[in-house]
Image (cartoon, rainbow, N blue to C red):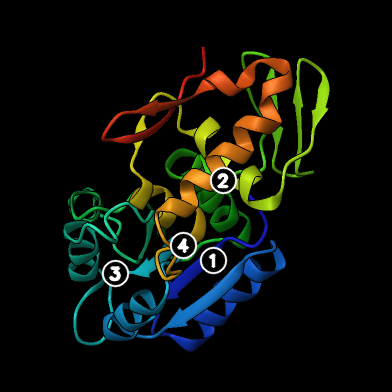
Amino acid sequence: MAAGSSILVVEDEPAIQELIAVNLEHAGHRVLRAASAEEAQQSIHDALPDLVVLDWMLPGDSGIMLARRLRSDRRTRDIPIIMLTARVQEQERVAGLEAGADDYISKPFSPRELIARVKAVMRRRAPHLSDETVEAAGLSVNPATHRVTANGKPIELGPTEFRMLHFFATHPERVWSRAQLLDEIWGDHVFVEERTVDVHIRRLRKALEPTGHDGMIETVRSAGYRFCAS
């Protein structure tokens, strides 16, 4: 997973919260902390995290209740959730998954297991946050080195155009509106005009034009843009 991904840890036991946070930070992630569902919601209101590590048992509203709320809200429904639970019965695990959790970790757990589960869930649910190179039709995008090649030739991109291309390449064939692209690439708390998307699309296409890859970014009338990987 790409270093710098933000992870919200919702855990009311200070020792466990510290253990999780230290290990995630050591793995290169930015960690936000909350000790209750209420604190977590305030943190999420301020800025969307890339993933939530959520304890089942919390003071006040439970982790299950928070997971359901996150899944029912359009703004937060796609945030990956890993639940921490001391409950080992199958029906309890199923309840967590049905509430919207993507995975769960049973206490006690090893830091290595935690990091592996986080990486797996992020790779599955948020591929644009992965460090893995993406390739399509002779186009290669490496998020670890921020290098792009087209038919083996280097392509120079600005940071925003790189993020845009990497996002498109990890979500091929889907149509994205300008508003969705603003949320995904700039962040949902950055207030930028939608026409800004068009400006960066033009810059990206111009950079890809010499190798003929500009046609991979299609305009879908009245809808937005789509990345055609074939």
- Tell me the kind of residue under disc 1: Ser
Q: Position of residue 190 (x, y in %)?
A: 46, 69
Do the numbered discs 4 and 3 sit on residues whose CB atoms are within 8 Å? no
Q: Earlier in the sequence, mark 1 or mark 4?
A: 1
Mark 3 or 2: in front is: 2
86 versus 148 height, above or below: below
Q: Earlier in the sequence, mark 4 or mark 2?
A: 4
Residue under pointer 3: 56
Q: Residue at x 51, y 35 (%)?
A: 168
Q: CA distance from mark 4 to mark 2?
A: 15 Å
Residue under pointer 2: 200
Q: Earlier in the sequence, mark 1 or mark 2?
A: 1
Residue under pointer 4: 187
Residue under pointer 1: 6
Figure disc tally: 4
Q: Earlier in the sequence, mark 3 or mark 1?
A: 1
**Nearer to us in this view, 199 or 70:** 199
- Tell me the kind of residue under disc 3: Trp
- Tell me the kind of residue under disc 2: His
Q: Position of residue 86 (x, y in %)?
A: 34, 66
Do the numbered discs 3 and 1 sit on residues whose CB atoms are within 8 Å? no
Q: CA distance from mark 1 to mark 4?
A: 12 Å
Mark 3 or 1: in front is: 1
Whether residue 184 is visible to the viewer of this picture, yes or no, is no
Identify the secondary structure beneath mark 4.
loop
